Amino acid sequence: MSRSLRPLVIGTTVALFTVACGGNEPAEAPTPTPAPAAEPAPTAATLTNHAPLAALPAAPEVPLPKLELGRRLFHDTALSGDGTLACVTCHSFEHGGAEPRRTSTGIRGQVGPINSPTVLNASLAIRQFWDGRAADLAEQAAGPVANPIEMGATWEDVVARLGADESYVEAFRAAGYEGVSQANITDAIAAFESTLITPGPFDRFLGGDLTAMNEQQQRGYMTFREVGCIACHTGPALGGQSFQKMGAVQDYFALRGGELTEADQGRFNFTHEEGDRHFFKVPTLRNVSQTAPYFHDGSQADLSGAVRIMGQVQLGRQLTDAQVADIVAFLGALDGELPAHARMPAAAAPAAAAE
């Protein structure tokens, strides 16, 4: 090898050795891409879509003479056969527009078969009565008056009785009616009842006032949504928009015990369709903390117990004590303010129509 090539070979060898030896140093690992931060779980305060729930609408405007006539009729025992009962007897404003009895007590102390649902916000329901047999409030108002175990009158007698009262004749005239008739009586009562809308804390919360519900109520609202209550309790009244089987996933009547009653048959009694057996209109949850006892049979005296049973038989869930307590707290935020015009003025109240 010539002397001129020797440095080149040696330099090349050193360079190759240096490259090869460089592998003894560990290569730098690529910098990992950080995982995206998990989205925080929504809370009542951050929820932007409250569907299928909604705030209550404003009450309809009813001319004052018609509203006052309807209110008077709603409170008047003259609509019953013996002058002892009025609409307000079973739809007491002291009990959330419902009654504190398991089932209604009618004329001459007769015990009815079913618990009276609330009249408050009832105008928002798709139909009236537990079985939906009445299309609207006017049709509903006609039923109890002539029912022999409820108010026990006849419409012929009621119309004659009111028609003989000059103050009523004038009140019907002032309200725009042509005389006293069953249709005009029930229309006036329905007009009054349609104004019984009771907004409360939940509505203010939906309107953006995040202080309207406390921490537990907000937690209960989210639990109410998450466990599935909103599948049936929908709309501004949180109910009244569908008919559902009592005991959708577990036999409610077996759990309750006792003999089945005619009232237990639910909507079947009206439609005579087998598929409607044990189906009932989903009740509104507005003011529900005031309307015990619960269910169509009035069998549950305690709201916590009612929530627990509904979780079991309708949703197939065994709700924890904490979940039940939170949901009950949320339901308290559905209590609303009774309109100032709902009660009769003290000086004008019919003497026998005390709640």
Image (tube, rainbow, N blue to C red):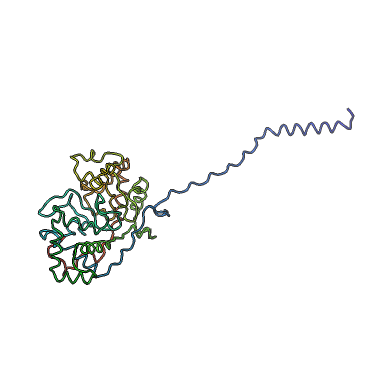
Vertical order, 15 against 181 (above or below): above
159 sits to left or right of 275:
left
The image position of residue 236, as x and y in percent, is: 34, 56
Task: Tally the marks.
Answer: 0
Residue 330 shows in the view: no
142 sits to left or right of 36:
left
**Foreground: 82 or 11?**
82
Quarter the N terminus occupies: top right
Q: Residue furthest top?
A: 1
Quarter the C terminus occupies: bottom left
Residue 198 shows in the view: yes
**Foreground: 147 or 62?**
147
Vertical order, 57 against 38 (above or below): below
The image position of residue 228, as x and y in percent, is: 35, 46
Residue 28 found in image quarter: top right
**Foreground: 257 or 108?**
108
Residue 163 found in image quarter: bottom left
The image position of residue 325, as x and y in percent, is: 30, 48
The residue that appears at 28% across and 51% down in the rendered structure is 283
The image position of residue 75, as x and y in percent, is: 18, 63
